[in-house]
């Protein structure tokens, strides 16, 4: 899908005419490139890239001076919840795509947790059509692995895949029934389909509001032990072992889970994992006086676990970073902590929050960006996520250093439940390009 | 025309419990005999007296129409007294164990018992406890020997041989006794067997049964001489093993498109009863190359041959 094809931005990429991005710091995790240079876009694709384009544009090309800022592949976010269809007051595909563009995200993968659940071919068609008509970034669909996300009966994995579903997930819940999970993995394998799983034992986590431990004990909230996660991850790895199905643990949150995945990878099992930006940058202490914007699933863990996740990312054990963008309105967030809804938005802050790790010297820029570009592209089989001749011209131009303070009222997402509200951040997207068209430029208001 | 009269006849067994271990010579002996029975069945007078005075009990713990009536007809055409015992009307419903049922029946001095049971191995267990001959008419997901023999006979009559043919068995292999018996018989007769099913309907060691395994039906049917479809039970198509009948039909139902990958003269088989529109398109079931009705006819002939063969070893001779 190239939704932005007909929505030309201020550097319109007319067919045949080229746009040259000069004087950039090219960062391409796929090739390990980090050097001054430039990039030429033609017909929505990257026509050329390299140091030879630092100053010289091809004849007739529209020139964009990058002023030494970073030009990287546009970010790919594999876990985005919207309310489209069914909960449009929280977020539509359109508002989510505006938020994405403002955050330098050029591809979002929408989760099946909608009303109705995306478990049928007709719904995949519907969401694809809505995205084509309204979204300004690429939208892919993660379809339901089980009917109604109930974890009981397999969804039509083969037909959904043919309709365009890019992977299969049980959304915000784990498939508790081991037999069902085994059959999903086994069946999906025949289609080469990726199964993405939220790893949280529903029985252990029932009623829990946050991570169990000292903080939960002090503030009197019911907690869930990390074992609720590790039990499911461990079980899933065993199932991958007997089925051979491709498996991705959606968002891990603790060192022990990472250990299991690391060992599975060492045994050459087709296992990968992701982490949400929240678990890389926040911990349970941030909840402070019952701030419900920090109520997420899996829950924020202790600082030790956050550090372990960052180290795992730097070591390459964690494959992808997701925003886990989950819009919730005031109605369900402005409640006593235990009764408030889970979820935090994150599309617009994904890049800036991730750059925190870079500025804190916790990780280098290349491995950080790798987890949001080429890794998710490979995982999902997308041609984007790389600065390579012939690849889609999905790009982000960003200043990694500029300081700013987040005001959630200025966010483009329809719901404003950001845990980074009033945070000091460093680095932001200046320009976002999808299929050669500029869909966001810092300082310009979105065109509705 | 007794077995003894046929010099090459060889079937030195008291029971027919499985196809595993049957030699090509034994199988061909039964098929040769069944060929003759098939001729008899097409005559006006089909009655013979090979089993006159003998008692045949059809003991069915699982509902069956075609296998039971096929055995009943086979027994009657050979002159036996045939009694049908169905589980719904038997003492099993009152809590009697399988072995007690066997001992009770044994006391009635039958000569041959034909047994179908939902548990694998149940027929063999019963055979150990009775004095008469036992024929397995299907035990769980283990074996259904007479089905495989009638399939082999149908193939042999239509193609003139079994050796060298490529046979694709498609569908619910996991729960299929028909598939297991067929794998043994076809392999023994020199055919090449392929199994085609989604991974959820394949036993974990399917590739160890002497068959090539395919999870893509278009690929699995490529160049086949025989396409043998299996029945998918309704309760297994609602999300447990396959997502839906619609998806199953799309990827594993035999339609014109998939069939076009088999050889142009490929035969279409199905042990029945069929789910039209689930594992097989209605038009394919009635296709000119469909031998599904021949299979039913050969069923009676093969069962007559098996009864006749076992009769040679009955006591009280």
Image (cartoon, coloured by chain):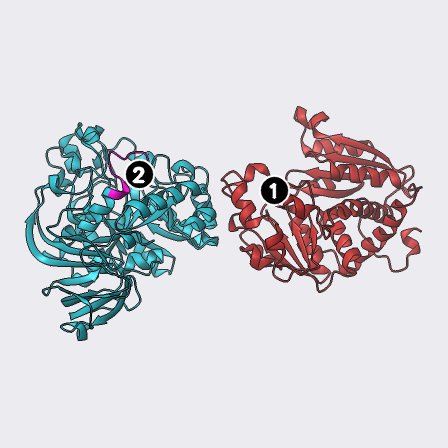
Chain colours: A cyan, B red
Q: Would you say B211 lies left or right of A178 here?
A: right
Q: Chain of mark 1?
A: B
- Do marks 1 and 2 share a chain? no
Instruction: Give the main secondary structure, helix, strand or loop, of the magenta stretch.
Output: loop
Magenta stretch containing residue A426, yes or no? no
For label 2, the SS is loop
Q: Which residue is mark 2?
A: A84
Residue B128 appears in the picture as rendered: no
Q: Residues within 10 Å of mark 2 (few under 14, many from 20)?
A: many
Q: Chain of mark 2?
A: A
Q: Which residues are magenta?
A: A82-94
For label 1, the SS is loop
Q: Position of residue A448 (x, y in %)?
A: 20, 43
- Picture quadrant of residue A37: bottom left
Q: Position of residue A28 (x, y in %)?
A: 22, 65
Q: Position of residue A232 (x, y in %)?
A: 34, 44
Q: Which residue is mark 1?
A: B277
Which residue appears farthest toward the top when viewing the image?
Answer: B94
Residue positioned 21% across, 46% down in the render: A98
Q: Would you say B239 lies left or right of A75 here?
A: right
Residue A184 appears in the picture as rendered: yes
Magenta stretch containing residue A92, yes or no? yes
């Amino acid at each position: 899908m190239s939704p932005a094809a007909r929505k030309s931005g201020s550097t319109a990429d007319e067919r045949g005419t080229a746009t040259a991005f000069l004087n950039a710091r090219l960062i391409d995790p796929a090739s390990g490139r980090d050097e001054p240079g430039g990039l030429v876009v033609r017909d929505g694709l990257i026509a050329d890239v390299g140091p030879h384009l630092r100053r010289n544009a091809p004849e007739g090309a529209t020139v964009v001076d990058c002023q030494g800022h970073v030009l990287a592949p546009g970010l790919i976010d594999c876990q985005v919840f919207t309310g489209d269809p069914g909960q449009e007051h929280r977020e539509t595909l359109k508002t989510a795509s505006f938020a994405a563009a403002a955050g330098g995200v050029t591809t979002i993968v929408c989760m099946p947790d909608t009303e109705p659940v995306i478990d049928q071919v007709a719904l995949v068609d519907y969401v694809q059509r809505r995205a084509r008509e309204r979204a300004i970034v690429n939208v892919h669909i993660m379809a339901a692995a089980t009917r109604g996300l109930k974890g009981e009966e397999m969804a039509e994995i083969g037909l959904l895949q043919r309709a365009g579903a890019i992977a299969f997930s049980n959304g915000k819940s784990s498939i508790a029934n081991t037999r069902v999970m085994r059959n999903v993995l086994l069946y999906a394998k025949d289609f080469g389909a990726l199964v993405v799983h939220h790893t949280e034992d529903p029985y252990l986590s029932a009623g829990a509001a946050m991570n169990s431990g000292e903080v939960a004990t002090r503030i009197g909230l019911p907690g869930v032990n990390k074992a609720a996660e590790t039990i499911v991850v461990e079980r899933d790895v065993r199932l991958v072992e007997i089925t051979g199905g491709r498996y991705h643990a959606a968002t891990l949150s603790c060192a022990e889970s990472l250990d299991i995945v690391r060992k599975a990878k060492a045994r050459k099992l087709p296992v990968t994992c992701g982490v949400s930006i929240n678990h890389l940058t926040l911990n349970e202490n941030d909840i402070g006086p019952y701030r419900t914007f920090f109520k997420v699933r899996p829950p924020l863990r202790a600082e030790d676990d956050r550090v372990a996740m960052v180290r795992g990312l730097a070591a390459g054990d964690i494959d992808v970073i997701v925003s886990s963008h989950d819009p919730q309105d005031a109605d369900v967030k402005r409640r006593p902590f235990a009764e408030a809804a889970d979820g935090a938005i994150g599309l617009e802050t994904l890049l800036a929050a991730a750059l925190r790790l870079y500025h804190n010297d916790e990780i280098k820029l290349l491995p950080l960006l790798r987890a949001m570009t080429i890794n998710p592209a490979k995982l999902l089989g997308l041609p984007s996520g790389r600065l390579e001749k012939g690849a889609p011209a999905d790009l982000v131009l960003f200043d990694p250093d500029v300081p700013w303070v987040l005001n959630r009222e200025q966010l483009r997402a329809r719901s404003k439940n950001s845990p980074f509200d009033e945070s000091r951040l460093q680095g932001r997207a200046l320009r976002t390009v999808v299929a050669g068209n500029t869909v966001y430029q810092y300082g310009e208001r979105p065109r509705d | 025309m007794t077995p003894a009269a046929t010099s090459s006849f060889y079937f030195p067994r008291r029971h027919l419990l499985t196809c595993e271990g049957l030699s090509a010579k034994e199988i061909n002996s039964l098929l040769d005999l069944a060929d003759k029975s098939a001729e008899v069945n097409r005559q006006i007078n089909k009655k013979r007296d090979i089993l006159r005075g003998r008692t045949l009990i059809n003991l069915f713990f699982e509902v069956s129409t075609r296998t039971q009536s096929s055995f009943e007809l086979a027994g009657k055409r050979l002159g036996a007294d045939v009694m049908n015992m169905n589980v719904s009307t038997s003492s099993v419903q009152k809590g009697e164990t399988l072995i007690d049922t066997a001992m009770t029946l044994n006391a009635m001095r039958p000569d041959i018992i034909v047994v179908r049971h939902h548990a694998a191995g149940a027929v063999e267990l019963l055979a150990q406890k009775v004095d008469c001959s036992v024929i397995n008419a299907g035990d769980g997901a283990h074996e259904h020997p007479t089905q495989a023999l009638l399939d082999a006979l149908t193939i042999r009559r239509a193609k003139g041989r079994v050796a060298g043919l490529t046979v694709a068995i498609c569908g619910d292999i996991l729960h299929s006794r028909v598939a297991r018996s067929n794998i043994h018989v076809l392999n023994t007769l020199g055919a090449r067997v392929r199994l085609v099913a989604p991974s959820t309907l394949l036993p974990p060691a399917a590739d160890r049964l002497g068959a090539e395994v395919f999870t893509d039906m278009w690929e699995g049917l490529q160049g086949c001489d025989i396409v043998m479809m299996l029945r998918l039970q309704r309760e297994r198509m609602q999300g447990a093993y396959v997502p839906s009948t619609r998806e199953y039909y799309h990827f594993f139902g035999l339609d014109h498109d998939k069939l076009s990958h088999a050889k142009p003269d490929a035969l279409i088989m199905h042990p029945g009863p069929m789910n039209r529109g689930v594992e097989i398109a209605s038009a394919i079931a009635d296709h000119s190359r469909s031998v599904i009705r021949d299979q039913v006819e050969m069923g009676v002939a093969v069962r007559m041959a098996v009864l006749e063969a076992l009769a040679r070893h009955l006591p009280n001779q």
